[in-house]
Amino acid sequence: MRLSESEWQIMNVLWQCHPATAREIAERLPAEVNWAYTTIKTMLTRLMGKGAVSEVKRGNTSVYEPLVTREKARGSALGALLNQAFDGAIEPFLNFLSTEKRLSQKQRKQLEKLLAAEEEKSRGKK
């Protein structure tokens, strides 16, 4: 599932505070976002079509819940980036991160810890 930048903003609100109405979402969007109520409703309809959001009617009011986790959405976004920019390969992506974007020493240590923990988990499964 690919989310647009605007859809990410709405999903970020829903991940933080759900269930929520369109008005509640509008109130929680960043200050620089100045969308009309109808724009938010349109984006929520698109998100429902993508299977990212559910809608439940409470009287005349629609209440929305995320159906996809932030982690799943991130995984999908990263997969799309890898496919589009790095031919689906992780190694060129990691090389790009470590050389072009110059990971700080702290970030390198954190990445090493994550990789070591994952390696330990996979050894435990064997």
Image (spheres, rainbow, N blue to C red):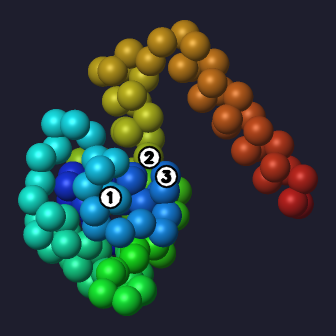
SS assignment at label 1: helix
Tag 3 secondary structure: helix
Disc 2: CA contacts within 10 A as few (<14), some (14-19) or many (>=20): few
Residue that badge 2 annotates: 90
Q: Nearer the viewer, residue 54 or 27?
A: 27
Q: Tell me how far mark 1 sits from mark 3, CA to CA.
A: 10 Å
Residue drawn where x is 88% and y is 60% of the image: 126
- Identify the image quadrant of residue 30: top left
Q: Earlier in the sequence, mark 3 or mark 2?
A: 3
Left/right of residue 61 with respect to residue 14 in the rendered view = left
Q: Which residue is mark 1?
A: 25
| Residue at 56% from the left image edge and 19% from the top image edge | 108
Separation (CA) of disc 2 from disc 1: 35 Å
**Image spot of residue 5 (x, y percent):** 21, 52
Looking at the image, which residue is at 38% across and 15% down? 102
Write down the residue under mark 3: 16
Which residue is farthest top? 105
Q: Is residue 103 above or below residue 92?
A: above
Q: Decide: is 107 above or below 9.
A: above
Q: Nearer the viewer, mark 1 or mark 3?
A: 1
Against 6, is 43 above or below?
below
| Residue type at numbered disc 1 | Ile
Tell me the element at label 2: helix
